[in-house]
Amino acid sequence: MRPSPVPAAAGVYGWHFKQPPHQDLDAGRLLYVGIAPRYMANRTSTQNLRKRVRYHYRGNAAGSTLRLTLGCLLGLELRRVGSGKRMTFGKAGEAALSQWMADNARVCWIERSEPWDLESQLISQLDLPLNLDQNRHNSFHGRLKELRAQARQRAREWPISS
C-alpha cells in the first residue's frame, strides 16, 4: 500500500470534485464534510482521518454515506448483498465508483481532537449539498434524500446479489 499524506489523527475532512456528481452541483467547490472519529459517549472510536478517507475512496456504499450518495447521483444500481441487510453497488459498481473518485474526487482535512463541533458549524454555515445529517436547510437536501430512498426501494425489489 502506498504511503498516505492523510494523517492518522482526528479531524474534519472535506470533499470537492473536478467533475461534479450531478448537473446541479458545481465543480471544484466543497460539497461534503465528514469527521473521524464520530462522537461516541460510551466508547472510544478507532477511526481517524486516514482510515476514513481511505474507506471513502476504496470501501463500499454500506459503510460510506458519501459513496452511497455519489453512486446514487451517478446512476449506479444499488443492490442488496450478503444477508440482504447491507446495500452496495456490487463489485462492478463499487469498482466504477472508486475509479470515478480516483479521477474526480479531491479531499482536504484539518486535524481537530474533537471534530464534531467544527463539523456542525461547517454544515450550518456553508452550502454543503451532499451532507444529509444536520442539513435539512440545504436546498439539495430533499432531492438527495428522495434519490437515495428510491435507490434503496429499487434494491429491495431485486433478489440479493452474490
Image: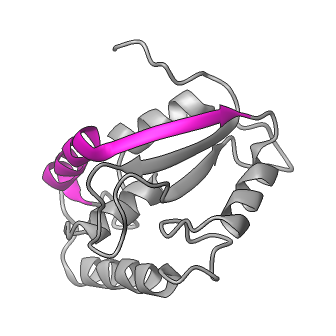
Residue 59: horizontal and vertical position, in percent?
Answer: 37, 42
Residue 109: horizontal and vertical position, in percent?
Answer: 59, 36
Query: For residue 48: magenta?
Result: no
Figure quadrant of the C terminus: bottom left
Side (left or right) of 37 relative to 162: right
The residue shown at (51%, 57%) is 32
Magenta-tinted stretch: 89-111
Residue 148: horizontal and vertical position, in percent?
Answer: 38, 77
**Would residue 73 be seen by someone viewing this image from the given angle?**
yes
Q: Between residues 81 and 115, which one lies in front from this camera angle? A: 115
The correct choice, above or below, for 15 with respect to 2 in the image is below
**Majority secondary structure in the magenta region:** helix
**Would residue 47 be seen by someone viewing this image from the given angle?**
no
The residue shown at (20%, 42%) is 99
The residue shown at (59%, 22%) is 7
Figure quadrant of the N terminus: top left
The residue shown at (80%, 33%) is 113
The correct choice, above or below, for 42 with respect to 161 in the image is above
Residue 87: horizontal and vertical position, in percent?
Answer: 34, 64
